Structure formats: C-alpha cells, structure tokens
C-alpha cells in the first residue's frame, strides 16, 4: 500500500520513516502534487489548529482540507490525529474512509507518558531548586496526572492530588499520593513548590493564584490561568512533539501499521 503523509511537524517525519520498510511512503508539505493518487493519507497529530486547514508548521503555505480528495483515491483511507465535522463530511462526500488514530487508548496512554516525562524536565528547568524533597500539587488525576505523579514520586517529591470526585481522590491515595478537594487546598497553595494543572477548566481561585509564588505548570489544553499566577507560569502544550518527536512519531506509526495489519493491507 502507498501512503502519503500530509503536513505535520517532526513527529510525522519520524512516523513516515518508521513505516518505510513496510509500505511505499511519501510526504507532502504543500508543494507540487504527486503524479498519482495514494491508497491512504496520514494527517498529523493534531490534525488541525486552524479551521479547514491541515496542521502543517513545516509547510511554506496552508494545506486546506479540500485538497485531500485530490491526493487520495476513491475508497482510500484517511488516517487522522483527531477529527471534526468538516473533515468527516469531506471524507464521506468523496468516498474516503476516515480513521481517527488518536482515538486509540493505547496511543493516548503513550502520549500521556511522554507528556509526563517532558513535564518533569520542565519542572527541573524551571527553578534553581530541586525536585528532590519538593512539594508538588497536581490538579486532576487522569492519564497525565496519574503518570506524572508516579514519576515525581520517583524523583523524591511529596505529591498531593487535588480532584473533585472522591473516588479519584481515593485512587490517588491508594497509589501513594496525598489527596484533597479543591476547596480544601485553595488556602494552602503557598505550601507547594510546584503546581501542575491537568484540568482544562477554572478551578483555582484568582486571589489564591495571584498570591502563589512558586512554579505553575499548565498541562491542560487551554491557558486558563495565563496572567493570573503570582509566581512563574509555564504554558506547556504539545510536549511530545517538542521534547520527544522521534518516539511520538514511532508511536503514531505503530497505530497506522496495526490498523493496516488488521485489514490485511500491505
């Protein structure tokens, strides 16, 4: 099977290279069209950051969704790191099968692990202190929060998890962290050297944040607290692509290969 990688950052270059031994692979970054259409295309992760355009930071010009049917033959597959209504409609109207490879729980967990690893690096770089013997507050205990807590404890941190649901707080305690709810922790923010936020909604009070003088690491998808933190604020989005593009790309290639093998595509 011939596969065309469209747009993306360094992760997609590594993903394409990882598939070279199994498939005929080319990359498209907005230059001249290939001579013929491909059996499949791979869109990046994230697939888009601007409505109607493929995420393509390495391209000299925008790559609109509308060129995808010109690159992939009828009945072909479009692998995408996410999806929206516009992309789904385009594929349906042109008889293309849309596969959201980021819907894979395995890939989501692998990316969460890379995010947690990079978050530790950012915290180490962020101050003249040390993770050893430091106190860290993690808000939220989803995939990233759980993996980050485990890594920080290995560095010798005292980790407290703030979560809204009691069951989540119990899980954090069973995993070896302290836990609390947000209302209880608000007056105590000054106790923590670092705060890592993984919750993409406003749960911290503005007054408490303005008085906090430590390091606040934003790992959620929205910079909710930008300009509100008294100490150092770090907005850390897309960490796998920035800190470990090779491994992140290889993980994407594994998902593409696995799907192709399940359908006996070669």
Image (cartoon, rainbow, N blue to C red):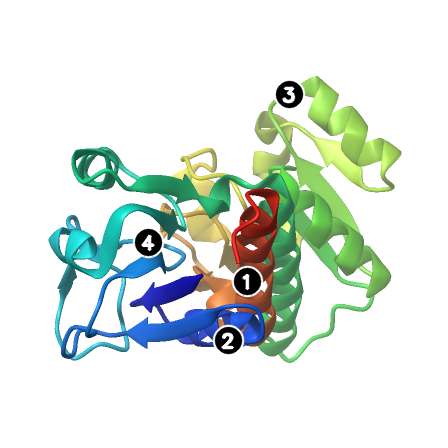
| Contact, mark 2 vs mark 1 (Cβ under 8 Å) | yes
Mark 4 to mark 1 CA distance (whole Å): 15 Å
Q: Which residue is mark 1?
A: 253
Q: Which residue is mark 4?
A: 47
Mark 3 or mark 4, whichever is nearer to me: 4
Farthest-out residue, top: 166
| Contact, mark 4 vs mark 1 (Cβ under 8 Å) | no
Mark 2 to mark 1 CA distance (whole Å): 8 Å
Which of disc 4 and disc 2 is earlier in sequence? Answer: 2
**In which quarter of the view is residue 175 placed?**
top right
Report how many numbered discs are placed on residues in the image: 4
- Image position, residue 196 (x, y; %): 58, 52
Position above or below: 154 against 65: below
Which of disc 1 and disc 3 is earlier in sequence? Answer: 3
- Image position, residue 16 (x, y; %): 47, 72
Instruction: Using residue 197 as the reference point, say whether residue 157 is left or right of it.
Output: right
- Image position, residue 246 (x, y; %): 56, 75
Work out whether residue 15 or residue 32 is closer to the camera in this orientation and state it: 32
Give the structural element (helix, strand or loop) at label 1: helix
Mark 2 to mark 4 CA distance (whole Å): 16 Å
Which of disc 4 and disc 3 is earlier in sequence? Answer: 4
Mark 3 to mark 1 CA distance (whole Å): 36 Å
Which of disc 1 and disc 2 is earlier in sequence? Answer: 2
Q: Which residue is mark 2?
A: 14
Q: Which residue is mark 3?
A: 165
């Amino acid at each position: 099977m011939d596969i065309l990688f469209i747009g993306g950052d360094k992760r997609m270059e590594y993903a394409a290279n990882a598939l070279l031994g199994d498939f005929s692979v080319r990359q498209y970054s907005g230059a001249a069209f290939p001579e013929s259409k491909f059996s499949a295309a791979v869109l990046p992760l994230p697939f888009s950051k601007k409505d109607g355009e493929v995420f393509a930071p390495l391209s000299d010009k925008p790559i609109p969704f509308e060129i995808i049917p010109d690159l992939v033959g009828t009945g072909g597959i479009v692998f995408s790191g996410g999806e929206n209504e516009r992309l789904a409609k385009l594929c349906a109207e042109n008889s293309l099968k849309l596969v959201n490879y980021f819907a894979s729980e395995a890939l989501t967990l692998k990316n969460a692990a890379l995010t947690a690893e990079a978050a530790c690096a950012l915290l180490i770089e962020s101050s003249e202190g040390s993770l050893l013997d430091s106190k860290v507050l993690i808000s939220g205990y989803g995939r990233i929060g759980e993996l980050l807590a485990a890594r920080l404890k290995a560095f010798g941190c005292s980790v407290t998890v703030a979560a809204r649901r009691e069951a989540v707080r119990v899980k954090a305690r069973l995993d070896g962290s302290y836990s609390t709810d947000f209302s209880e922790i608000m007056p105590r923010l000054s106790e923590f050297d670092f705060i890592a936020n993984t919750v993409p909604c406003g749960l911290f009070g503005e007054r408490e944040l303005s008085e906090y003088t430590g390091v606040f690491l934003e790992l959620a998808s929205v910079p909710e607290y930008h300009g509100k933190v008294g100490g150092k604020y770090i907005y850390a989005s897309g960490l796998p692509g920035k800190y470990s593009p090779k491994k992140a790309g290889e993980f994407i290639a594994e998902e593409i290969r696995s799907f192709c093998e399940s359908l006996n595509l070669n």
